[in-house]
Each structure stands twice: as structure tokens, then as C-alpha cells.
Image: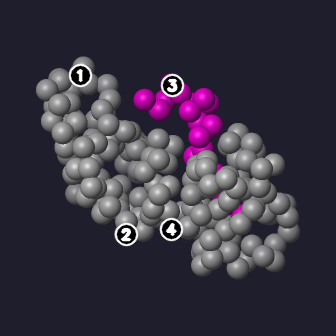
Amino acid sequence: MRPLTEEETRAVFEKLSKYIGDKVKLLLERSDGVYCFRLQKDRVFYASERMIKLASTISRDNLMSFGTCIGKFTKTHKFRLHITALEFLAPYAKHKIWLKPNAEQQFLYGNHILKSGLGRITQQTGQYQGVIIYSMNDLPLGFGVTAKSAIEIKAVDPMTIVAFHQADTGEYLRNEDFLS
């Protein structure tokens, strides 16, 4: 376990800011203590300083996990968010999409969002913006990237993809071996 390098920190913050903007600071300076990011075996963990101090007493080889894994670095050194980060991204989301009940299951199976399944979208959402996907009951289901802006979506065909799937809560079941 080690602190992120400057380049790694920039990659993590850029990815997080796609979804929550400048509210990344709120993740680090919380009312219940100071939190930070640490790297362990290409995975980025989000944990309190207290938890990190406790985890540092365990050798690197024996340490499997601590805090919450929010993502990992690929072999090409790009940062990819895991669905486990949804709990921390959802309260601070800049842009949101709500799905109709009949489209929720399709999204949870890993499919993109079609206009026919779109319940509503936040105003001023641009093309290729990071969005948090919600059910109509305000339950966060996952996250993705818009394929069209909110203005363009009004004029497209019902079978047009309006948001690309990136991660959903169904991954807990589909990819449980790889999320740890």
C-alpha cells in the first residue's frame, strides 16, 4: 500500500471529476474524518486515515483489501472506475439520468440506454458527460457516459442510444471474482 504518485492522482481525480465535478474535495475532507486514496496492487482504495494506519501494520503480501476499492489502473496506466465507487459518486452527481422501470433490467444486464428507456435527464447535460444512472425511485443503479446532449435527445428516434453503459450494480453478480 502506498500513496498515489502525482500522475496517478491526476488520473483518478480527472475520472472522478467527470462524474462529480469539483466536489472531489468533499470526498477527502469529510465531517467524519480525513479520507485519502491509496494504491495496492494496481487498485485504488478510498479509506480513512485511521483505517490506513491500521492497514499499514499488515505486510503488503498479506494485505488483500482495506477501505473501498474505487477502481484500478489498467496495464496501459489508464484509470477505470469500479461499481464499488457508486456509493461515493451518487450523492455528488453533476448529471443524472433516470430510467423507466422497463429499462432498468436491460441496463443492469450491461446494455446501453435507449431513448425509449429514458425517464428523465438533468438539464444542461452535454454530449460525452459522465452521468449517474438512477431508477425512478432515486436508487443509484450505475454510471455511464451520454451519447447525446440533453437537447439532442429530444429529437432522436426512440431506438437511439442516449447513454453508454460503463458500470452497473449487476456487476456485483456478474464479475464478483474481479471486484475484490
130 in relation to 43, above or below: below
Q: CA distance from mark 2 to mark 4?
A: 10 Å
3D distance between C-alphas at marks 3 and 2? 32 Å
Mark 1–mark 4 Cα distance, whole angstroms, equals 38 Å
Q: Which mark is residue 94?
A: 4
Q: Identify the image quadrant of the C terminus.
A: top left
Question: Who comes first in sequence, dot 2 or dot 4?
Answer: 2
Inter-mark Cα distance, 2 to 1:
35 Å
Q: Position of residue 104 (x, y in %)?
A: 73, 47
Tag 4: amino acid: Lys
Q: Choose mark 3 or mark 4, whichever is in front.
A: 4
Could you tell whether 96 is left or right of 62 in the image? right
Q: Earlier in the sequence, mark 3 or mark 1?
A: 1
| Pointer 3 with pointer 4, Cβ within 8 A | no
Name the outermost residue toward the top. 62
Inter-mark Cα distance, 3 to 1 = 19 Å
Q: Amino acid at mark 2?
A: Asp
First in residue order: circle 1 vs circle 4:
1
Please tell me which residue lies in front, 11 or 53. 53
Q: Which residues are magenta?
A: 161-180
- Crowding around mark 2 (Cα neighbors within 10 Å: few <14, some 14 to 19, many 20+) is some
- Inspect this view and state whether residue 82 appears: no
Q: CA distance from mark 3 to mark 4?
A: 31 Å
For label 2, the residue is: 22
Which numbered circle lies on residue 177? 3
Q: Is disc 2 placed on a helix, strand or loop? A: helix
User: Residue at left 85%, top 64%?
Assistant: 158
- Mark 2 and mark 1 lie on one chain; the one further toward the N terminus is 2
Residue at mark 1: 61
Q: Residue 93 appears at what percent x and percent y? A: 50, 62
Residue 105 figure quarter = top right
